Image (cartoon, grey):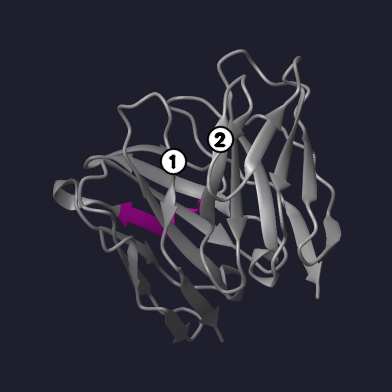
Amino acid sequence: DTGVSQNPRHKITKRGQNVTFRCDPISEHNRLYWYRQTLGQGPEFLTYFQNEAQLEKSRLLSDRFSAERPKGSFSTLEIQRTEQGDSAMYLCASSLVGTYDEKLFFGSGTQLSVL
Amino acid sequence: DAKTTQPNSMESNEEEPVHLPCNHSTISGTDYIHWYRQLPSQGPEYVIHGLTSNVNNRMASLAIAEDRKSSTLILHRATLRDAAVYYCILTNTGNQFYFGTGTSLTVIP
């Protein structure tokens, strides 16, 4: 078990550029979550997948954000036309659903800075 | 999303027990009570969870009130490595994990 892996760890970009983050979940996990966290706040839910299906997106998620999980394996989160307000830590978590109690396993996150 | 209330911050002396409270008066009968913690510069990590009965694991204990409207995470002997933000979350099978702002625990040497 290598845990949840996120790449890159840090990303600095200029306003208006597109960025893409990758998350590799724990291999047998069927659910994958994306969260965003700003300083002093708890993680904020963005979206989640069960296998390859995206089952829910937060109402706070603008249409500049898109996520995919092809073949139910790794996932990517893309932000188009980045804004300074997008600066945050982007966290990925995975879990195994099917038992009565689901536990999340988080990666170390991707820190995005938009200049 | 189910609501929990936690103190913003708490302090504890090293090697002393710590009791971190959480109120969840609107909990439903099928909601699980989860605790996660987040160390600086890391993603949150699972600590413990329960439904009705008190739970123990190698990291902590979870005491759940009889009416389930509150719970307490107990760290039996705080160490400096326990300094973190602790989140109390209600969740249900198929529902999301919504994090609040948590309790920032400071451990004093």
> Which element is circle 1 on?
loop
Whole-number angstrom distance, CA of label 1 to CA of label 2 = 9 Å
* Quarter of the image where one finds residue A56: top left
Q: Please report the residue visible at 54 percent of the width from the left and 59 percent of the height from the top.
A: A36
Q: State yes or no: residue A65 in magenta.
A: yes
Q: Which residue is mark 1?
A: A103
If the image is split into quadrants, where does the N terminus of chain A sit? bottom left
If the image is split into quadrants, where does the C terminus of chain A sit? bottom right
Chain containing the residue with disc 1: A
Q: Please report the residue visible at 23 percent of the width from the left and 57 percent of the height from the top.
A: A74
Amino acid type indicated by mark 2: His
Residues at discs 1 and 2 in contact (Cβ within 8 Å): yes
Chain containing the residue with disc 2: B
Instruction: State the extent of the magenta-drawn residues as a range.
Output: A61-67
Q: Residue A23: where, in percent of width, then height?
A: 31, 62
Q: State yes or no: residue B50 in magenta.
A: no
Q: Residue B72: where, in percent of width, then height?
A: 75, 37
